[in-house]
Image (spheres, rainbow, N blue to C red):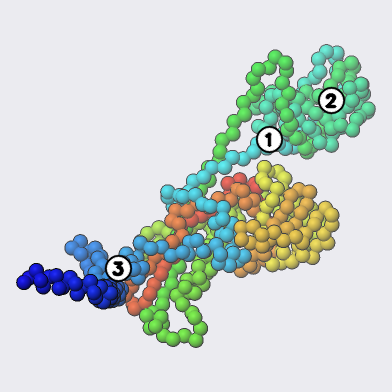
Amino acid sequence: MNCNKFIKAMRWMRSHKKLIIFVITMILIAILASCLNGGQAGTATMAVGMLITGLENGKHVVDGPLTTDLSREGSPDLLLNEIDQQIVKIRPMSTPIDQISRYGGSKHAGSMIVDFYSVDTKATRTTLTQDVESVDEVSSGESPTMVIHTANDDIFDPTDTILVLNTPGYTSDNNTLSEESTQDLELYVLNRDSNGVTVMAVNGPTINGVSNCIPDISSGSILVRMGRAASELDVQSPQFESLPKKSRNLCQIFKMQVEQSTLQRLSNKEVGWTMSDQEEAAVYDMRMGMEKSFLFGSARKLWDPVKKEHVYFTGGIWNQAGKDFFIESSTGLDTTRMVDLMHDAFTGNTGSKRKILIGGSKLISRFNKLDYTRVISAGQHVSKWGIDFTEIRSKFGCLYVLLSEVFDEVDMAEYGIVIDPEYIQKYTHIPFSTEQLNLKKSGVRNVDALVMTEASCLVLRYPKAHMRINFR
């Protein structure tokens, strides 16, 4: 009996195979739809997560996934804002010093006190402090020697040669003092001690058959140290040692805090003024303050009697520059004086041939009023470090000129500074960072708060490659 029922059932299924397949398909579709709806419902439920406190005051997420909002609420320092990468894009023309230092990269400082070393070049010029009188009567024999006294005897060593400017030398066949050549007099250093510098003349006159005597040299003559001259059997030379000079600057902690009340955030606004807009404005104001400190700050450490702790102040690069150029109020700045400025900016140091000139509005106005020639040309625009400069070219080098309203704010509109970007270094003890303050939970006030911090300083590694432009 059961066998007959089974056979009949099999026959019925064969005859209704299409209907069975359709029913099974619909059942599977219904099951799949039910699963999808369940997943979507679960997702909707999971989207509303919450934080709970663990046994060790840690934060845990329940009833939902970890989101950025929950991350900022439970661990404010975990996610960093992108202000650090975007800071160089916030009004760079207004803060050129800070802008250039950020593009050049900074070195990490392990302390708020930064010690750095710079190597200077040995002086090459000095002046004669006493007259040198020639000897009218010289007995036959070797060329005479003489001890001379200069304003800086220490720059000379044995075997050095000295060029005496504006004191004529003599040709090899001269035998009297009156037969002068167009060459300047050259001296050869035999010795240097506490008594002075012992020298011989290289191209002096011939007297009584003795060649290379020393002629008259007037006090105040400029002496230029030239190359050393060794003899054939010389193996060694006087030693040359150069020790770096130690300098110090202090990192200053720059801070800026932005707050927005909860009601302000929730209120409808006529324009889209958000917390991000406030952050950008705060970054700009912070950079303007840092620009002034980096330029004109004084390196000091003071005790705050209210906070009961020390406060560090960074030293500005204005006082670190090693050269000065003066513009006289009576004569002003003309093309000739501009050539002198370019000369002083690019000579007397081993700096680069492209430097930056940042000045106040009155100084830049003087530049604009100049009649430029083939020797001094201007008008080309150059974009570097995210800043648009006006280029001034000369035979000495190129200056990238930019107006800085910081000089106007400190009543130095006639002043400026020439900076060699190759020798400016930023030290950072605390990199620029942002931190969200939870003032609500601490019971201070019902606001969203963000504080921005950086501890840094600027140093000029080679002071003589930088020059102050003063007005008097």
Q: Please name the residue shown 85% across and 14% down the image.
A: 139
Q: Residue at x 76, y 48 (%)?
A: 396
Amino acid type at mark 1: Asn
Nearer to the camera, 167 or 99:
99
Q: Which residue is mark 2?
A: 203
Of the residues under marks 3 and 2, which one precedes in the sequence? 3
Q: Amino acid at mark 2?
A: Asn
Dividing the image into 4 quarters, which one contains the C terminus?
A: bottom right
Gap between marks 3 and 2 measured at Cα = 91 Å
Label 2 element class: loop
Q: Nearer the viewer, mark 3 or mark 1?
A: 3
Name the N-terminal-most of marks 1 and 2.
Answer: 1
- Label 1 – label 2 distance at C-alpha: 23 Å
Residue 190 screen position, x and y as percent: 72, 22
Mark 1 near mark 2, Cβ–Cβ under 8 Å?
A: no
Instruction: Assess disc 1: are there few (<14), some (14-19) or many (≥20) residues with their C-alpha within 10 Å of its C-alpha.
Output: some
Q: Are the residues flagged by discs 3 and 1 in contact, CB closer than 8 Å?
A: no
Q: Is residue 329 visible?
A: no
Q: Is residue 450 above or below residue 421?
A: below
**Horizontal arrangement in the rendering, residue 85 relative to residue 155 (left or right):** left
The total of numbered circles placed on residues is: 3
| Position in image of residue 353 (x %, y %) | 70, 48
Mark before the other along the chain sequence, 3 or 1 = 3
The local secondary structure at tag 3 comes to: loop
Q: Secondary structure at mark 1?
A: loop
Q: Is 97 drawn above or below residue 405 in the view shown? A: above
Name the residue rendered at 47%, 53% in the picture.
428
